[in-house]
């Protein structure tokens, strides 16, 4: 059983808020503020990291991604699953580089679209935010159904195009943070993830094989036990609390942010 999509999603939000956030909660700094982003960029990045944390499960035909875009995503996840197997190629550092590179590429396309009221927007960035937000919202069960997540996603994509138009750094960075959070989440369960230098895989000799470094070369640090364990639920409850508090504090700390 794979780790739940909602748990991966919230781990992406929390990881992003911990690294990129700059808010203080009860007098304590609650984020490392690594990249000196504005409040709008931090929140937009949190949305993207939430969706980005679902990308590695594009190899899983019953995961959130698969159920998000009808036949199109079903076909995509089936094809990837057949080619890579679950927790294979898409659960590697190389895949994180590819996801991030693709995001940077689409983000960097100078593709201007005229939108009524809003004026000219960068359509590549708006599209990425739309997809990531739709995935994240669905995984977190903020909205249900096939169309509603996309409507919410599109709203977020257009909003970001207006309030955080300079997407060159934070958008690909948020995809990377989200996808890495996914790998760490799966690493913490007994199934583990492929050897970090995949496709170069070091397999242990039979007598050295252990749950930490398996015969297949997969590695695990199974602090959470099996996927879906009580410990996984507990950790994700804590992460959800952290994410909600820091996102809330960031929004509250920037009253003008949504009124641009
Ligand atoms: Zn996974």
Image (cartoon, helix red, strand yellow):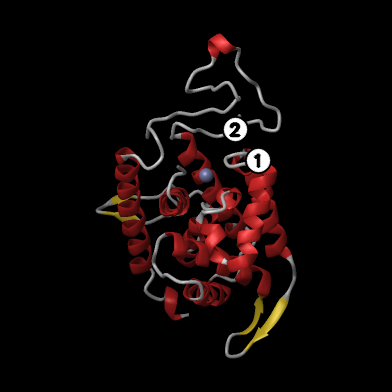
**How far apart in space, not on screen, are marks 2 and 1 (Cα)?**
8 Å
Residue carrying label 2: 194
Q: Is residue 176 visible?
A: no
Residue 102 drawn at (x, y percent):
69, 56
Residue 87 drawn at (x, y percent):
57, 40
Q: Does dot 2 land on a helix, a strand or a loop?
A: loop
Q: Earlier in the sequence, mark 2 or mark 1?
A: 1
Residue at the extreme bottom: 117
Left/right placement of residue 205 relative to residue 10 reads right
Distance from mark 2 CB to nearest ligand 1 atom below 8 Å:
no
Labelled pair 2, 1 in contact (Cβ < 8 Å): yes
In which quadrant is the N terminus drawn? top left
Task: Name the disc covering residue 89, or none.
Answer: 1
Query: Residue at image x 48%, y 57%?
Result: 50
Residue 26 drawn at (x, y percent):
24, 53
Q: Is residue 177 visible?
A: yes
């Amino acid at each position: 059983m794979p780790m739940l999509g909602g748990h991966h999603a919230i781990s992406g939000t929390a990881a992003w808020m911990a690294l990129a956030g700059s808010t203080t909660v009860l007098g304590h700094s609650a984020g490392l503020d690594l990249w000196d982003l504005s409040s709008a960029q931090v929140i937009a990045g949190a949305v993207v990291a939430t969706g980005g944390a679902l990308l590695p499960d594009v190899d899983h035909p019953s995961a959130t991604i698969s159920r998000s875009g009808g036949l199109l995503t079903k076909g995509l996840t089936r094809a990837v699953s057949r080619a890579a197997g679950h927790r294979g190629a898409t659960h590697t550092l190389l895949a994180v580089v590819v996801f991030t590179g693709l995001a940077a590429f689409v983000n960097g396309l100078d593709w201007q679209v005229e939108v009524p009221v809003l004026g000219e927007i960068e359509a590549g960035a708006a599209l990425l935010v739309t997809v990531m937000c739709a995935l994240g919202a669905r995984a977190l069960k903020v909205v249900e159904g096939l169309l509603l997540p996309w409507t919410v996603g599109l709203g977020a994509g257009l909003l970001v195009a207006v309030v955080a138009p300079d997407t060159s750094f934070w958008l690909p960075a948020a995809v990377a943070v989200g996808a890495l959070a996914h790998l760490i989440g799966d690493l913490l369960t007994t199934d583990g993830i492929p050897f970090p230098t995949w496709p170069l895989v070091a397999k242990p000799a039979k007598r050295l094989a252990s749950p930490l470094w398996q015969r297949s070369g997969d590695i695990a640090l199974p602090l959470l036990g099996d996927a879906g364990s009580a410990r996984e639920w507990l950790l994700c409850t804590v992460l959800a609390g952290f994410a909600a508090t820091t996102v809330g504090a960031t929004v509250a700390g920037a009253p003008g942010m949504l009124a641009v």
